[in-house]
Image (tube, helix red, strand yellow):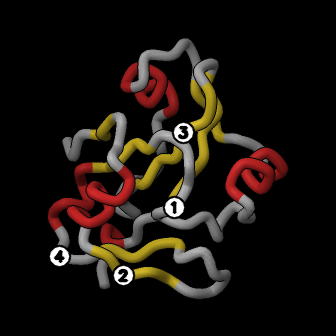
Amino acid sequence: MEAGQTAPTLITKTDKGYFSIIFSGSRSRIDFELIAKIVNVSQAKLANKDKIRKITGFDPGDTPMVGLNIPTIFDKRLLQYSFVYGGSRQPNRTLKLSPLALIKLNQPVAFLESD
């Protein structure tokens, strides 16, 4: 497995509510100014751990790739892999899915370009 195949899920807070971001582990960081532009909000920032737990029912780091009832932003870098690995709803366990299945299950409202 390559680092790029890891697909962590972050929760971001905006003035239009919360979004999940499923991104490739090959990104060195998430540009929240870019996220704000992509979803047409004035500001986006990482949600705090208490809010993440309240919204998702999970601790940061255990947030699943699927099954959240908030809009999703999907990283197109993940499309270069047959399978990616991320949160499964169970601590210390990962879920293996195709990126296309993730798109189908999450129906993203926006995409991060692969640049």
The residue where tag 3 is placed is: 19
Instruction: Give the spatial CA distance, label 4 vs label 3.
Output: 25 Å
> Going from the N terminus, do you reach mark 1 or mark 4 first?
1
Mark carried by residue 82: 4
Residue type, mark 3 in image: Phe
The residue where tag 2 is placed is: 96
Disc 2, SS: strand
Looking at the image, residue 88 lies above or below residue 47 = below
Viewer-side label of 2, 1 = 1
Instruction: Give the spatial CA distance, label 2 vs label 3.
Output: 22 Å
For the point 52% across and 46% down, which residue is it?
Answer: 20
Looking at the image, residue 85 lies above or below residue 34 = below
Q: Residues at badges 4 and 2 in contact (C-beta under 8 Å)?
A: no
Position of residue 98 measured from the top left corner of the image (x, y, whole percent)? 25, 72
How packed is label 3: few (under 14 Cα within 10 Å), some, or many (20 or more)?
A: many
Instruction: Give the spatial CA distance, label 1 vs label 4.
Output: 21 Å
